[in-house]
Image: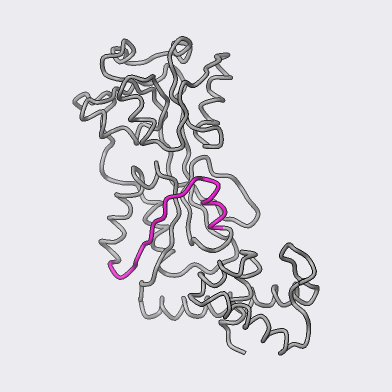
Amino acid sequence: MQVESFKVFRDLVESRSFSKAASLNFITQSAVSQQVRAMEERFRVPLIERSNKRFGLTREGELLYDASKQIVFQVDSLQHQLSEMRNVVSGTIRLSTVYSIGLHELPPYLKKFLREFPSVNVHVEYRRSNQVYDEVGEGTSDLGLVAFPLQKKTLKVEPFRKDRLVLICVPTHELAKETEIAVARLKKEKFIGFEPDIPTRKAVDKIFREAGLEVNPVMEFDNIETVKRAVEIGAGVSIVPRQTVEQEVRAKTLAAVEFIGQPYYRPLGMIYKSGRVLSPAMKRFLNVLKEPLETPSAPINGAAA
């Protein structure tokens, strides 16, 4: 029996989907079913509970799943060690990230990595936060970049960087004249917010609660770009990560204002599946993401340094 069969079975169990297991292994769903049946015939035991509507394993299937993880782990480990001995860094990294990170945080790191390791293909997919966790957990993505990272048993979480949250408004707004403002100043403002399931929305709601402020958004969106466009046309003000509006501040289509007192931050994190062997390419990419960038951030409100 080939190692690929154990990998297909492991991916099937972890994704609970024949189609996803097929996609991960570049084969058809029919081929996944055939390999499972072949394993059942080889070991002469049922592996999958076929009487239930939901995906489930028999006791024998659970045992084979544990063994499959160990077998694939050992083979992957050997392959990666051999690649490192030959100093080979190549392959594909499948990365899922939310729009704000992928568009505004990732590019300089990606450029630096690809300049150093041109043989690696980094495939980036833009997803909502919950989808990033799902894809990394299912194995359809090797790495995820999220805001306000959550600790989960099956995932390894490492800090990436953190962004300072600022108020944004049109440059003609009265608040744009201020260098710093108190959160309480937003009491009578029309507020442009994120949808309730977006992590940054939850953080902004917490800021308002701590300030004893009730703010009802006049508009809600699921991505940073639409929020910025709404603020640019004067529909209201918003609170966003500073890094995401540097271009608009320089172009003077938006103004960004700091908050008085202790700053508010949006922490970003890297997530990948725990218990998996990291390829040489993944190890190098994670190292690049942990390194500080030399390029300084643009000054607030577009002022000269």
Placement of 234 over or under 91, stated as above or below: above
Q: Nearer the viewer, residue 180 or 127?
A: 127
Identify the image quadrant of residue 110.
bottom left
- The residue lying at 37 percent from left, 80 percent from top is 86
- Quarter the C terminus occupies: top left
On the picture, is 15 further left or further right than 279?
right
Q: Where does the image place residue 258, in percent across and percent down from the top left?
A: 37, 21
Taking the magenta stretch, the answer to whether it contains residue 128 is: yes
Q: Where does the image place residue 287, in percent across and percent down from the top left?
A: 40, 57
Color theme of the render = one colour
Placement of 122 over or under 295, stated as above or below: below
Q: Where does the image place residue 193, in percent across and percent down from the top left?
A: 46, 27
- The residue lying at 44 percent from left, 81 percent from top is 82
On the picture, is 56 further left or further right than 154?
right
Taking the magenta stretch, the answer to whether it contains residue 160 is: no
Q: Where does the image place residue 159, in percent across and percent down from the top left?
A: 48, 46
Identify the image quadrant of residue 239.
top left
Q: Residue furthest left?
A: 304
Placement of 38 over or under 179, stated as above or below: below
- The residue lying at 55 percent from left, 32 percent from top is 196
- Magenta span: 118-136
